[in-house]
Amino acid sequence: MSICESIKRRFIRLSKGQRRVAQFVLNDPSIVTTKIASEVGRIAGVSESTVHRFCYAMDFAGYSELQKRMKEDLAYHK
C-alpha cells in the first residue's frame, strides 16, 4: 500500500493539525522529499512538532523515514 493510500485510510483518526499535514502531503507528495519538517509545518500552517506527530501516527520512526518511504513510493509509481 502506498503512503498516500495509508494516509487516506487513517485520515479520520488524525488530530486536526495532523489532518492539515496529511492533506498537504496528499496534495503534493513530492514536497516531502525536498523540504525539512519545519518547512512542511510552516507551509501547512502547523508546528514542526505536529509534523513529527503525524509521522508517528502513520507508524514512521520520524520525518526522515517518511521522506525515505515517500521517495521510494514516488519512484515506484512513475
Image: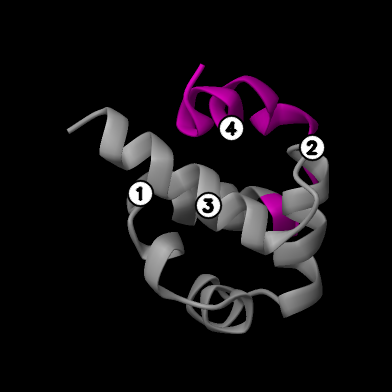
Q: Give percent across and percent down for residue 2.
A: 47, 25
Give the residues drawn in magenta, as a range.
1-18
Tell me which numbered mark, 1 or 3, is placed earlier along the sequence. 1
**Rendered position, 71 above or below 74:** below
Q: Do the residues labelled 1 and 3 touch (CB within 8 Å)?
A: no
User: Mark 3 packing: few (<14 Cα in 10 Å), some, or many (20+)?
Assistant: few
Q: How far apart are marks 1 and 3 (CA)?
A: 18 Å
Q: Residue at x 52, y 32 (%)?
A: 3
Tell me which numbered mark, 2 or 4, is placed earlier along the sequence. 4
User: Mark 1 packing: few (<14 Cα in 10 Å), some, or many (20+)?
Assistant: few
Residue type indicated by callout 4: Ile
**Rendered position, 76 above or below 54:** above
Tell me which numbered mark, 4 or 3, is placed earlier along the sequence. 4
Q: Which mark is residue 59?
A: 2
| Most common SS among magenta residues | helix
Q: Quadrant of residue 62?
A: bottom right
Mark 3 sits on what residue?
68
Where is the C terminus found, in terms of image quarters? Answer: top left
Residue type indicated by callout 3: Lys
Q: How far apart are marks 4 and 3 (CA)?
A: 16 Å
Q: Does the magenta stretch include residue 12?
A: yes
Q: How far apart are marks 1 and 4 (CA)?
A: 12 Å
Mark 1 sits on what residue?
27
Tell me which numbered mark, 2 or 1, is placed earlier along the sequence. 1
Q: How far apart are marks 2 and 4 (CA)?
A: 11 Å
Q: Which residue is drawn at 77% across and 63% down?
A: 52
Mark 4 sits on what residue?
7
